Image (cartoon, coloured by chain):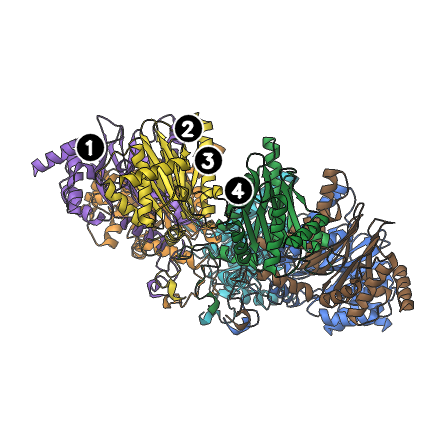
Chain colours: A blue, B brown, C green, D yellow, E purple, F cyan, G orange
């Protein structure tokens, strides 16, 4: 057994507890998320909730329109995925099926928190049974709940999920979280524009780079338009301008 | 084989007996519960039964309303979960299904002790079969039985469960148990307020900290209102005040 | 491979025969029974059969009414379980199902010896197939057979079972067996009171302690009342008094 | 790898061939039969066939009526089992089911040789497939075939079976076989009494002990009474007396 | 890893190819056939085909009528089995089922070559899939085909099968094959008696022993009587006499 | 453990995460694609999309008409496969079934992006479950979407897929990608001829060889003819001539 | 771990990729084909296609009529198999079922290329899933396609297949291929006789031996008679004569 396994002694080769009660395969799956090179942001304003990420084309020849971390789950629910892309797509596929099944069974749209729970439960199963590995992806889910207003959830490979005022995932998760915590100390009631601009400025801050509209992708739900949609590039450009003016 | 496995020699890598008749994976799952950083309390009074825990938001950006160790299982049954959160949620989901199935089949609410047994039996299965790991969670279940009065059960990863006058789980389980044993020596018939306040003071005592109403969550069932519900923050605040006055 | 496996060389990591024809996992499961800290007694008198054990509350806060090694299987059959508690409960659940199934199929109560065989057959399966471990529990079963009179059986993790005049299981199994063998040398025809008192005195003897009524639990079936029931604390107290007077 | 595995090098940890074409797990299961401490005898006379064994109560407190190596399979077929008792009981249960199934399907009693084949085929399966271990038991089966007269078969863990004039199994199998071979050299046509007495004297000889009627159990089928039955203790006593007079 | 595995390095612990393209478990199963202590012969004459083997009673007490390497598969097909006896019986059972199934489906007897193919295909499966070991048995099958005349096939654990003029299996396979090759050099058209006598003389030659009629068993199919049957002892005796006279 | 596993320590023997969050089996499958000796190109022009590869006959005796990296999936969709050929064919078979199923279910042709997603999802499954290995193949898929125009996707063994302006796979993937990136810097709107010629010149460039029409195979979809078809050799020859003239 | 595994380090014990992207079990299965001692040839002429191999009787006693590497799949399709004979027969059985299924479903004979694909797909599955080993056989398939004329395919254990002008498999595959390449350099349009004679002379050349008609077996399909049939010995003799005259 080589040095790299010294502290884990084989407890990390399968879904079993270590003597310290750790599930190493789950911990390693978090590494997969951090090492993907992307950072995602989710922010909940007063009447708006957005997800945003740098749109990083892994290869100049890729058609940028096919690269997106943002996925529509239903007309009213969307998410940003960070980590292993194929795992992300599979998870979205299953979420869409769950949403369709829910709608068919109960006659109304699946609420954001129910969707979050179903995605998380699926992830938990991969941490308990021996026949598969955990999923290497973290989902930030947004939607607008008629009663609860804008909703923001994050689900990780362990099957955990929480609602958030703001959150981040991926390579610069820690830096983005620090940045956002400062901004949310005063518990601001962010307007639509403020919400979008905070998402953008968080990314700019942690990436240490000026971002153009085409470098960004932003998904949004708001009271005015509870449908989930991607912000058009012009709108992002607009917000960038306002953000620049504000500073 | 490295030093950390010296005493277990591989008997702890699967669900098998060690030469001493130990099931190591089950023992390791208890470590997972203790290392989660939370402590939960359950107390049964004369006509009241409560579960309580510190409400610890793992991340300042999390929407506190989505963080809770307390889960409603049916209108009349609730629990507090300590340990791996996704395991906890899965266990609650299964408990809800069992409860619904019972109600559908027998036409009345599942009694607390039947619920406790079903949760424990599910946990036992994970300790006997090779295809999965034990669940890393301890459930404290409360409810009001028409004949037996307030009911308090605790189920652990081994599949064991008992009824309790008072109990604790998690990081400070031992300290809380010591504290509660002293209080219960005289077999007190606690009133509603005393029950709630003892739960609070136990937490304050073992955490060595003054807790605010927003730092606490308390689930309750009582003779007056046999439905399981969460105590509103005002009520907790009230009890904190009374507790402070009493001391 | 560490020293503790020297004599077994891996033959004990699964359900396989050692070169000596041993099934180590089965032997280890017996260790689990002995290390549980409890001792159980079963005694068959002329017209009475009892099971008895010290009622040892693992934790002062536990509601003593929920701690019992004694389980009713049908109205006419009961048992005392020694070993891993969740395994014990699972085994009882399966026994109840078997009993209900038998009653439904044949229209009369399952006889004690048929029940014993079914419990033992279930245990045997866990010693032959690779997907699970043996059960870590020993069941002492009692009932009253219309033709055969009082019946006392013991089933162990290997799937073995025998009828007994008297038997013991658990931590002090050997000491209790020695004690009982002396008492049964003369093949006594024990009356109801003598049967109960011998159970109590055996426990007192091997535990080296005076036991109070509340420290004991006793299950009983007799010709007068073939239903299985727990002896009320007053009755146990009565018997303790008579026993004290007799000595 | 420790010394005890030197010659087998892991080929004995599962159902695979060793380089010498050996199936070690099967060989180890024979050890389990020999180490059980019991010896069984089967003898076929002219019109009678018996199985016999020492009735050895493992524990003085056991109800001797529940200890028996002899099992009735159908009204017309019985057997003596040597080896792991729970394996023995399972095998008998399956044999009874096969017999009932046969009777139901074909309308007549399952003949002894068909029964023998079915028991042996079941045993073979456990030596070919990876999911279970071989059975640790040897069955000596007797019955009376209308055409073929008294029938005596022995089935072992490998799935082999043969008809016998006389046979033995268990701890003193070799000694008993030697003794019987001498007696059968002249191909004697044993009467009912001679058959029973030879079974008894074989046991006495190999066990080096005078046996009382209560130390013995004998199963029998004969032309006069083709039903399988246990010889009552008086009859065994009778035979012991005759045997003593004869010597 | 001990010396005995030096050349195989673990490739022989399961059904996988070695770097040289070998399937070691299959090769080891051939060892099981050779080490059984028996030798079988099959010979095809002009209008007759026989299988023959020494009838070796493993134990003097065995009823010789239950020891046979020869099995009837259908009224028109029989075989001699060499190797692990329980494997042999299982293979015959499956062959009988296949034959019955064929007859039921197509309305005529299964031809010898179809039977051979089905037996071989079953054997092949055990060499390709991970869940079981190869069968340790070699079948020599005979029958009379209306068009093709006498038929003789041999199937081995690898799943291979060929038609033969004459063949042998088991301990002295090589010696018998050498002997038979010499006799068949001239491609003799053996009469019924010559066929039987050559089978006998081959066995006598390779076993270096004079065999009595009771030491032999011979199965036969011929143009006159296409049904498969065992040669009665008198007939074998007759042939032995003729053979002795001939020499 | 030999040196070649030093850095991976067994994490690469199955579908599990390494401590760094890597899935080694997936990474190794990419090696299989690169080591196949072929390079494939896909290029999307304004109204045309092509796939192209060197037609390399592995063996002079092979009928060149049966060697092709290009597969028709439906009348309107085709792909070029790079890597393990049998894996490639299996993947195409499954894609055809999916396409047929889609057409049957929805009544219209499966769009290129839906096809791409289904192929990728299948690949992802092989990276998550323990019972199989990842597929060792990379698919470049082309088709013409009525709304979106020419479509070009690449799917890899990880289950990832993107749309591309141009892309390459296989041995010279990196070189071809570099070459294509330069050509696409100016975001050219390639005509049909330019698209084909760029594919050819890319191959010539990275292979450092003049290619004849018979050394090439090119698949194409265009606005004029949305059906997927192979470019006839004359057309390729034509393009080669034009390309030579152009330079 | 012994030296023979030095370069493969366990990557060859199962169906997984090595760090170099190799599938060792597949490579080892090719060894099984080469080490079988046989060489097969397939040649496609203008209107004829043949398969040929030395007819090597492994044992002089074998009925030569039952030894053949050539198998009829349908009336119009045949093949020659090289490698592990039982694997070969299984593969042919499955091919026949596929062909019958195709005919039943579509109402016409399965075309040679479809058959080739189905055989190859089956082989691929054994290289991707963990529960079985690859097949150790290479199939050369011939048939006559109404449109395409004579067809010749070769499928190997990896699941690869190609059409060929001429091909070889087995021990002398390389030598035969070299010989055939020279002959096919000029792309000859071989007549029926030339096709057969080239097959023969290739075998004679690589085996370095004069072959008699009885040493050869040749399967053929031609425009005149599209049915697959074996060339009678007289015809082979004829061709041998012509070949000798020609030289």
Look at mark 1 in the image and give the residue it sits on: E233
Residue occupying image coordinates x 21% and y 54% = G208
Are the residues under badges 1 and 2 in a single subunit? no
Looking at the figure, which quarter contains the N terminus of chain E? bottom left
Name which residue lies at 30% across and 41% down.
D244
Query: Mark 3 to mark 1: distance in Å?
Result: 37 Å
Q: Pinpoint the chain carrying mark 4.
A: C
- Front position in the image: E41 or G231: E41
Q: Which residue is under mark 2?
A: D109
Asked if labels 4 and 2 share a chain, the reply is no
Spatial separation of the CA atoms under disc 3 and disc 4: 14 Å
> Could you tell me residue G126's position as x and y percent?
45, 50
Labels 4 & 2 near each other (Cβ < 8 A):
no
Compute the Cα span from label 4 to label 1.
49 Å
Q: Tell me the mark number nearer the camera, choosing from 4 and 1.
A: 4
Q: Please say whether residue D91 is visible from this viewpoint.
A: yes
Q: Residues within 10 Å of mark 2 (few under 14, many from 20)?
A: some
* Within-10-Å neighbours for mark 3: few <14, some 14–19, many 20+: some
**Which SS class for mark 3?**
helix
């Amino acid at each position: 057994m080589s040095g790299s396994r010294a502290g884990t002694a084989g407890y990390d080769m399968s879904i079993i507890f270590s003597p310290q009660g750790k599930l190493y395969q789950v911990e390693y799956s978090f590494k997969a998320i951090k090492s993907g090179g992307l950072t995602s942001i989710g922010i909940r304003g007063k009447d708006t909730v957005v997800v945003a990420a740098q749109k990083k084309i892994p290869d100049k020849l890729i058609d940028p329109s096919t690269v997106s971390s943002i996925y529509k789950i239903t007309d009213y629910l969307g998410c940003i995925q960070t980590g292993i892309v194929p795992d992300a797509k599979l998870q979205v596929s299953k979420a869409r099926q769950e949403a369709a099944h829910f709608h068919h069974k109960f006659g109304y749209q699946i609420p954001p928190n129910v969707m979050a729970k179903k995605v998380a439960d699926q992830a938990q199963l991969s941490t308990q049974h021996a026949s598969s590995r955990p999923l290497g992806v973290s989902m930030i889910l947004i939607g607008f709940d008629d009663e609860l207003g804008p909703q923001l959830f994050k689900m990780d490979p362990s099957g955990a999920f929480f609602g958030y005022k703001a959150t981040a995932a991926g390579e610069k998760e820690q830096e983005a979280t620090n940045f956002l915590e400062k901004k949310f100390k005063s518990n601001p009631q962010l307007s639509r524009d403020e919400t979008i601009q905070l998402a953008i400025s968080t990314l700019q801050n942690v990436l240490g780079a000026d971002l153009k509209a085409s470098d960004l992708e932003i998904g949004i739900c708001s009271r005015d338009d509870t449908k989930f949609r991607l912000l058009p590039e012009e709108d992002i450009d607009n917000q960038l301008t306002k953000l620049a003016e504000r500073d």
